Amino acid sequence: MTRHFLRDDDLSPAEQDEVLSLAQQLVTDRYGHQPLAGPQTVAVIFDKTSTRTRISFAVGIAELGGVPLIIDAQTSQMGRGEPIADTARVLERQVGAIVWRTSGQVRIEEMAGASRVPVINALTDEFHPCQILADLLTVRQHKGSTAGLKLVYFGDGANNMAHSYLLGGVTAGMHVVVASPAEYQPDAAVLAKAVEIGGVTGGSASWSPDAFEAAAGADVLATDTWVSMGQEAEAGVREAPFVPYAVTSDLLAKANDDAIVLHCLPAYRGKEIEAAVIDGPQSVVWDEAENRLHAQKALLSWLLAKS
Ligand code: CP
Ligand code: NVA
């Protein structure tokens, strides 16, 4: 059966652990693991802009012995409205896997539904699961493990990062709190799913309107832009409600002394995160960015082995 990775809970807790353990092995054995040798080609399609995702998939596929085929959707027939399922039918006969950054989750579900090769979500409006694998790997590296740790995400609770922290974090046994304005709360179904997974893993998921209360006892603090791709027209209104949720030195002081700070990047200093925090000693954002490479190499290897 073809395995896809469209949202964080597409991997069970045991499967997520396998992928993260392989990712950690690949940190030290970067060039010795070549399951794409042959080579197999992997299509990486972008409907939205990207720096980290584009680079890490291109480099990672090459390091696995494969050929990355980076496609800007606007310069393909997808940009002129060719059906998603037709695109999948063409790609699946020539590539080993399809990686796609797009808008609605329904679009990537449609691609996966029509594809016999694995489809990987490289960010949708609803989820960013590859990023969370990298973040969990970073937490493992700095904290030794993830189970039982408290991770608090501050900012837009309704965006892709908030949803993926909820699902991916509880899958890893973490206690995940999303601190956001009431009008930007997580999707109720996603929060409920995270609570359900927490019942199995020993983790938990919740929402809080109070950033400082949520920060108390945190092991990991995370944030993201207040204006996600596709929301540029709302930039004017997407500032004032989020100011109390900015990750500042004062907020960080409420967390555990050895807390680490994550940001998927790109970061907007002085908005969602203070410069002194992202550029300070508790920030691990550059490890986090590097870990996109290792986590995605492990994910691709794992999905292709299982499919
Ligand atoms: N974090 C992340 O996905 O970055 P890019 O948008 O640059 O790919
Ligand atoms: N929430 C952000 C993440 C960027 C990596 C966005 O969707 O633009």
Image: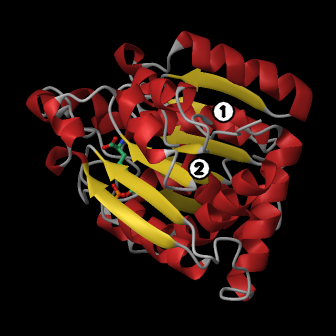
User: Which x, y percent locates residue 281?
Assistant: 51, 77
- Taking the spot 39% from the left edge, 71% from the top edge, the residue there is 55
Q: Nearer the viewer, residue 218 or 78?
A: 78
Q: Tell me how the rendering is colored.
A: secondary structure
- Taking the spot 42% from the left edge, 59% from the top edge, the residue there is 249
Q: Label 2 sits on what residue type?
A: Ile
Residue denoted by label 1:
167
Left/right placement of residue 12 relative to residue 114 reads right
In the picture, the disc for residue 132 is: 2
User: Do we see residue 146 in this rendering?
Assistant: no
Q: How many residues crowd around disc 2 within 10 Å: few (fewer than 14), some, or many (20 or more)?
A: many
Left/right placement of residue 83 relative to residue 237 reads right
User: Do we see residue 106 in this rendering?
Assistant: yes
Q: Label 1 sits on what residue type?
A: Leu
User: Which x, y percent locates residue 6?
Assistant: 57, 35
Residue 192 drawn above or below residue 73: above
**Mark 1 or mark 2: which comes first in sequence?**
2
Q: Nearer the viewer, residue 51 or 210?
A: 51
Q: Decide: marks 1, 2 in contact (CB < 8 A)?
A: yes
